[in-house]
Image: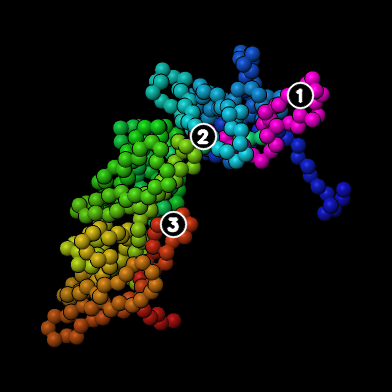
Amino acid sequence: MEGSARKVITVRSALIVKNKLEMPMELRLDSPSAPDKPVLLPAVMPGDSFAIPLHLTSWRLQARPKGTGVFFCKSPIHWTNVQKTSEVSSSKRDCHSMELDHSRFFRFCVAIKKENYPDYMPSSIFSDSAKQIFRQPGHTIYLLPTVVLCNLLPCELEFYVKGAPINGTLKPRKEAVLHTADTSQNIELGISLENFTHCKELLIPPGTQNYVVRMRLYDNNRRLLNLVIRIVGQAKGSLKIFISAPYWLINKTGLPLIFRQDNAKTDAAGQFEEHELARSLSPLLFCYADKEQPNLCTMRVGRGIHPEGMPGWCQAFSLDGGSGVRALKVIQQGNRPGLIYNIGIDVKKGRGRYMDTCMVTFAPRYLLD
């Protein structure tokens, strides 16, 4: 057919392997009757799919990452156990190292979904003497990472797993895949940021899914910052961990601003002497650390801008929505009149992956064009 009426019809196997890992995965199939004559299929690239050839769908399937020095997973991937449409079965696979150091693993998760294909071949096509029921492939096999960390902070973070050789650095909006993490055991995740070198490790027990919890970090002055950790189960044994902060305080005033929770005894965590002198270019991560005080914020001008003056705290305001204006006053020495800075406040709730964060922007109330 010509023109817009042209159609492309693809005929393929109904047994599909989808690689959701960030590295190529090799596939190996062998027949139970001839295990010494395996068939190696082309590597499935990250994000790609591969249809298992029809004559091999009944063979045992194994997988491993390409070029990493590990064996194929010992336990084969069986799709025949998933029989109901839209049913999903998931399990974990380990690939052992080829080296003498057998403590090194590559772990991944396998999720098998039965697609909306006929469950059986119609028996009416067979003669009475040959009527049989055949289980047909109509499945998608997903290869998933065991643990993925996602940094939703505006700054770089460092992570580690206590008691395991897992650590690294993660830039803003980036993800890290922990291939050696074992979700069948307790995972103690630790995080540190610039000026926040201490934390209370977060215990993630096996079976954790769709859970939101706070992680306690402490700055160099032992002031508390609570991060929001959202754990999403992609499949059994496969976790995605989103790391975010309750509030970003974004200073666009051109002035040094100091923040604290209303009625709190100390300034908010992450603020030091340099913040009194000049505006911070990066957002300040903020939380309501004192449960005994109201969930309100207050601010003042940094002392460095008027060394002889006395900056005062403004009227408290909420960080949970809307917009407003606050007057920041500086008392001058002698009989000189005080100074007032009118600061506009705009609060926006994060969307999508940033649903656990509010972005609060501070800007001059008036701008001369």
Left or right: where 131 falls relative to 277: right
* Badge number at residue 131: 1
Left or right: where 310 falls relative to 35: left
Is residue 205 shown above or below 277?
above
Callout 3–callout 1 Cβ contact below 8 Å: no
Which residue is painted at 38% across and 74% down in the image? 323
Task: Give the amino acid type for the residue marked by disc 1 in the picture.
Answer: Lys
Q: Is residue 237 visible?
A: yes
> Is 347 in front, or is 13?
13
Real-space CA distance between mark 3 and mark 1, rounded to the nearest whole angstrom: 56 Å
Task: Give the amino acid type for the residue marked by disc 2 in the picture.
Answer: Ser
Which residue is painted at 39% across and 20% down in the image? 101
Residue 346 placed where, x, y %?
39, 71
Label 3 crowding class (10 Å Cα cut-off): few <14, some 14-19, many 20+? Answer: some
Task: Give the amino acid type for the residue marked by disc 3 in the picture.
Answer: Tyr
Residue 73 placed where, x, y %?
51, 24
Real-space CA distance between mark 2 and mark 1, rounded to the nearest whole angstrom: 33 Å
* Badge number at residue 354: 3
Q: Residue furthest right?
A: 1
Label 1 crowding class (10 Å Cα cut-off): few <14, some 14-19, many 20+? Answer: few
Label 2 crowding class (10 Å Cα cut-off): few <14, some 14-19, many 20+? Answer: some
Task: Classify mark 1: helix, strand or loop.
Answer: loop
Which residue is painted at 22% across and 64% down in the image? 293
Between discs 2 and 1, the one toward the N terminus: 2
Which residue is the site of mark 2? 90
Q: Quadrant of the C terminus?
A: bottom left
Query: For the magenta stretch, what is the residue range?
Result: 109-137
Left or right: where 251 falls relative to 354: left
Which residue is painted at 49% across and 32% down in the image? 91
